[in-house]
Amino acid sequence: MTAQELATTLQGKLIVSCQAPPGDPMRETSTLVRLALSAVAGGGAAIRANDPQVIAAITAVVGLPVIGLWKDGDTGVFITPTVRHALAVAGAGAAVVAADATDRPRPDGSTFAELVEAVHAAGALVMADVSTLAEGVTAAELGADFVSTTLSGYVPGTPKQTGPDLDLVAALSAAIDVPVVAEGRINTPEEAAEALARGAHSVVVGTAITAPTALTARFVAGITRP
């Protein structure tokens, strides 16, 4: 599938992130596959998934594009941090490889441009996970097929917010020609719709749909009295 074909498929649509953090009871391949199937049944247009094993299992049964990544570690650049990780994700069947495209150093000393080149050579597309306007502009110039606001609020120096960074969505949409994907802290259908209204091509929602542990904790915190 070409970048233009996938962009057409995803325009104005919901991408569901089916992931679970380390130690969470949901972090099991067959469970994540069922989450993906549930997302399909609910009308999701694509799945975002972590880890080559999980990606391969989901692509085997879900007839939707999979945006794959490989989280390795939890500090610095850890979302598909190296070319090796990116090629493993592509090899697992992901239509799109999502990778950190911030200006921080990558653990293997490679560049984002090298990752883009390698993934394209492997026949997959690239989604650049960024935290700022400047990073998104650079990622688009380096050949990223999609740019996502995934890392806004999670990289030092970016604004801490309880909701999505809609200002970044709007700024990126005005500045670059590649599709902008809104991701990060989208908690309600209304916020998802607002992201599209502010210029997002597509919207990724994860925790608010597929994370019962986090959702339960949110309710417990809301009803717990000091």
Image (cartoon, grey):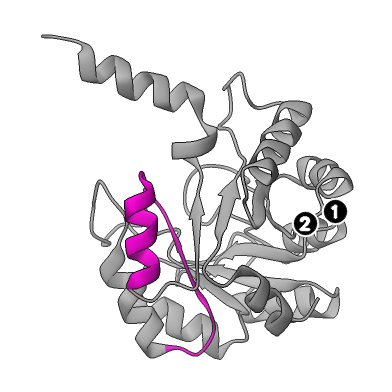
Q: Is residue 158 above or below residue 34?
A: below
Is 214 or 73 nearer to us in this picture?
A: 214
Which residue occupies the foreground of this view, 34 or 26?
Answer: 34
Q: How many marks?
A: 2
Q: Are marks 2 and 1 in contact (CB under 8 Å)?
A: yes
x then y, percent, for residue 161: 23, 51
Q: Residue at x 47, y 85 (%)?
A: 138
The circle on residue 52 is none
Residue 108 in the magenta stretch? The answer is no
Question: What residue did someone put label 2 on?
Answer: 89
Residue drawn at x 81%, y 56% is 88
Label 2 residue SS? helix
Q: Amino acid at mark 2?
A: Val
Q: Position of residue 35 (x, y in %)?
A: 67, 34
Residue 92 got which mark?
Answer: 1
Rendered residue at 42%/77% (across/down) = 135
Judging depth in this view, the residue of 113 and 132 nearest the camera is: 132
Q: Amino acid at mark 1?
A: Ala
Q: Where residue 167 sits in the image (x, y, percent)?
A: 26, 70
Q: Which residues are magenta?
A: 176-197
